[in-house]
Image (cartoon, rainbow, N blue to C red):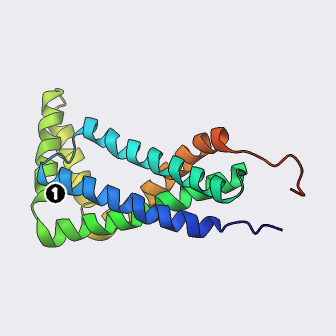
Amino acid sequence: MNEEPSTARVALKWGLILGVAQILFSTFLFLTDGIGNASLGYVSYALSIAGIVLVMRDFRTLNGGYMSYGQGLSLGTLTAAVSGFLSSLFSVFYMTVIDTGVMGRVIEKTREQLEDRGVPDDQIDQQMQVVQMFQSPGLLFVFGIIGAAIGGLIFSLIIAAFMRRNRATPFE
């Protein structure tokens, strides 16, 4: 009887690969002052989707061409969580050690975007206070992991539905 591959092992491998890709992309954003650019943010989503598709495809190949919906869901979510852990760790390190002025520039860019939209000054000030409350490295780290895991779960719910391939009989 063929032994089924470990979903955790495959997800950790692809989580590390996706995490490195996210770190490289984050470095590009930090160096080009692209943090806060919404259109560049979609590239990060595309990386996550590609990573989730690749982890499910790899697992399905290792598992004789089969993957249940639940396996796909757990693969994608765990991959995204590992990737989120690594990229959040890097981002916090970058913002606290390498370039401590990144968050100030992000806040200023956000203020400018709100002013361009015509948001009243009192509402802008309130929003800036909220942004500054969540600027601590610990919160950025925790919310980065949680956000990545939730995003991975949502993407996996959809992707696993298309990529699952159940065995004809449970005895295969």
**Label 1 neighbour load within 10 Å: few <14, some 14-19, many 20+:** some
The answer, for residue 143, to whether it is visible in the render is no
Relative to 39, does residue 68 appear above or below in the rendering?
below
Quadrant into which the C terminus falls: bottom right
Q: In terms of depth relative to the viewer, which is nearer, 9 or 42?
A: 9
Q: In terms of depth relative to the viewer, which is nearer, 5 or 72?
A: 5
Q: Which residue is mark 1?
A: 103
SS label for mark 1: helix
x and y percentages locating residue 137 in the rendered image? 26, 68
Quadrant into which the N terminus falls: bottom right
Relative to 125, does residue 88 appear above or below in the rendering?
below
Q: Is residue 16 left or right of residue 102?
A: right
- Residue 123: name its quadrant: top left
Q: Residue at x 59, y 40 (%)?
A: 158
Q: Residue at x 13, y 43 (%)?
A: 109
Q: Is residue 33 left or right of residue 61?
A: left
Q: Is residue 35 left or right of residue 71?
A: left
x and y percentages locating residue 143 in the rendered image? 39, 60
Relative to 93, does residue 61 appear above or below in the rendering?
above
Q: Amino acid at mark 1?
A: Met
x and y percentages locating residue 73 in the rendered image? 63, 52
Q: In terms of depth relative to the viewer, which is nearer, 84 or 106?
A: 84
Q: Residue at x 46, y 51 (%)?
A: 51
Q: Residue at x 41, y 61 (%)?
A: 17
